[in-house]
Amino acid sequence: MLILVASFWFGTSGVLAKPAMDAGLSPQQVAMVRITLAAVVLLVSVGLARPALLRIRRSDVRVLIGYGLVGVAGVQLLYFAAVSRIPIGIAMLLEFTSPVLVALWVRFVRRTILPARMWVGTVLALTGLAMVAQVWDGLRLDTVGVLAGVGAALCSAGYFLLGEHGTTTISPVGLVTWGMVVGSVAIAVIAPPWTLPVDRLVADADLGGLDVPVWVLLVACAVMSTAVAYLLSITALRHMPANVVSVLALSEPVVATSLAWLLLGQTLTAVQVAGAAVLLGGATLVQLAEARREASPVDAG
């Protein structure tokens, strides 16, 4: 249940951010506000409740910096850049090809033999991606938006790989919290807080026919779609296997697409909906194959 709630809140990020960008904020400014506020919320809440989780060693600093730059700042900047140019559901689907990228990294960089099921899942995911982007029609989607979505997927793969390495010595909560801090500092260099247009922050944005102040959307995106969602997903890992969590988390693109349709009027073609199903099916196969591979006994011979 926790991971489904977390996936719901993760899925709202694009829907909350898009009206703010339509009101005049840049993707960089939205990402900066989201990550900075989330970092503050996590630092305060974790610092008061479980300060021991924030302890790190000097040897962990490099992993934290990489995690914050790639897995936090990179993902957010590129995802919001994609959302500003292509439908939210498609941007989310592009990002969710990251399990395939992780599998390819494991195969060709770590030189680990992957099961056939993982290759089938990879082919399905790439086929679904081609259907979503409708590549046979000259890539009907905005090219820059698609490239930003693919970049978000690459950074998301880095998020998983660096997170896998980091959590061997750092608590997951500490890793996410300090990753947010590093990411917020990095994005603040690109979009300094003092450059935020105050008049745009207090202006109203259209969200499903409702006039909502931009600052309210940004606070909700930072607190609910980021801090709360991350904490819920981490807590879920304590109650169920990671492979189950990762598969249930695939409900996030469904949430994002549904909310974008209901609140923003963004629709997908029948081919794109079918492609989304194929892509998610392939990603699920990759996740399950990876879980089975990790659970298999290691051959000592």
Image: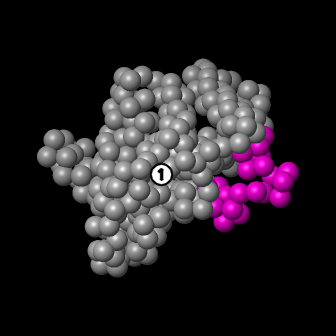
Rendered-image quadrant of the C terminus: top right
Residue situated furthest right in the rendering: 136
At 50% from the left and 24% from the top, the residue drawn is 244
- Considering the whole magenta stretch, tell me its main secondary structure: helix
The verdict on residue 245 being magenta is no
Residue at figure coordinates x 38%, y 65% from the top left? 32
Judge whether residue 131 is colored magenta.
yes
Image quadrant in which you'd find residue 112: top right
Q: Amino acid at mark 1?
A: Gly
Which residue does the numbered mark 1 point to in the structure image? 14
59 left or right of 77? left
Q: State the quadrant of the N terminus.
A: top left
Q: Is residue 4 visible?
A: yes
In this view, which residue lies farthest toward the front?
209
Q: Position of residue 144 (x, y in %)?
A: 66, 65
- Res 234 quadrant in image: top left
Report the magenta residues as a range.
127-150
